[in-house]
Image (cartoon, rainbow, N blue to C red):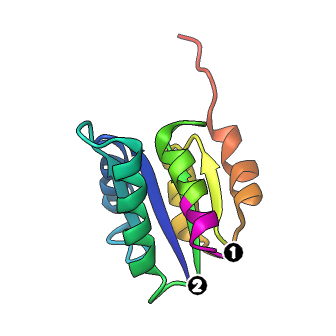
Amino acid sequence: MRAIVLVGHGAGCTGMQQSAEMILGKQENLFAVPLQPEENSTDYIEKLTAFCQQLNEDYTRILFLADIKGGTPAKAAALVSKQQQLNGSQLIMGYHLALILSSCLDVQKNASDLIFETTPMIQEFNL
């Protein structure tokens, strides 16, 4: 089974988790690991490593969804995945609620399918 781990700056990822669960109900495989203002990158990597080690007991794959491309949470997810040899894990940088919902609704879809499916949901609306 695949775990979905939202990584991001501050309470944004926990807010996205709450929003997704408001729509879909409680998701047993959806988690948020926020980078707090008082944490540095080393602290966050240690926190994320410990969290992923716990997940390995119940999940065979992890889909990391990061808030910003190249940000500390995204870099930490990539590093932890490599260091912990999280085979089958994937990372998508730049999440939005539709992507999170789709990830929860179909745990078989891989990262590129999820991006392809949800990118058209982002569009400008002229007022």
Helix, strand or loop status at disc 2: loop
Around disc 1, counting alpha carbons within 10 Å, would you say few (fewer than 14), some (14 to 19), or many (20 or more)?
A: few
Q: In the image, which disc is placed on residue 30?
A: none
Cα–Cα span, label 1 and label 2? 8 Å
Question: In this rendering, is residue 14 above or below 48?
Answer: above
Residue lying at 38% horizontally and 60% vertically, measured from the top left: 46
Residue 105 in the image: state x and y as whole percent: 55, 69
Mark 1 and mark 2 lie on one chain; the one further toward the N terminus is: 2
Question: Residue 40 lies in what quarter of the image?
Answer: top left
Task: Specify the amino acid type for callout 1.
Answer: Gly
Residue at 41 percent of width and 44 percent of height: 41
Residue of label 1: 88
**Which residue is more in the foreground, 17 or 31?**
31
Proximity of marks 1 and 2: CB atoms separated by less than 8 Å = yes
Q: Is residue 123 magenta?
A: no
The residue stretch that appears in magenta: 80-88
Kind of residue indicated by mark 2 = Thr
Query: Is 58 positioned to the left or the right of 86 in the image?
Result: left
Q: Secondary structure at mark 1?
A: loop
Residue at the bottom extreme of this rendering? 57
Above or below, comparing residue 50 to residue 116 in the picture? below
* Residue 98 percent location from the top left of the image: 54, 49
Residue carrying label 2: 60
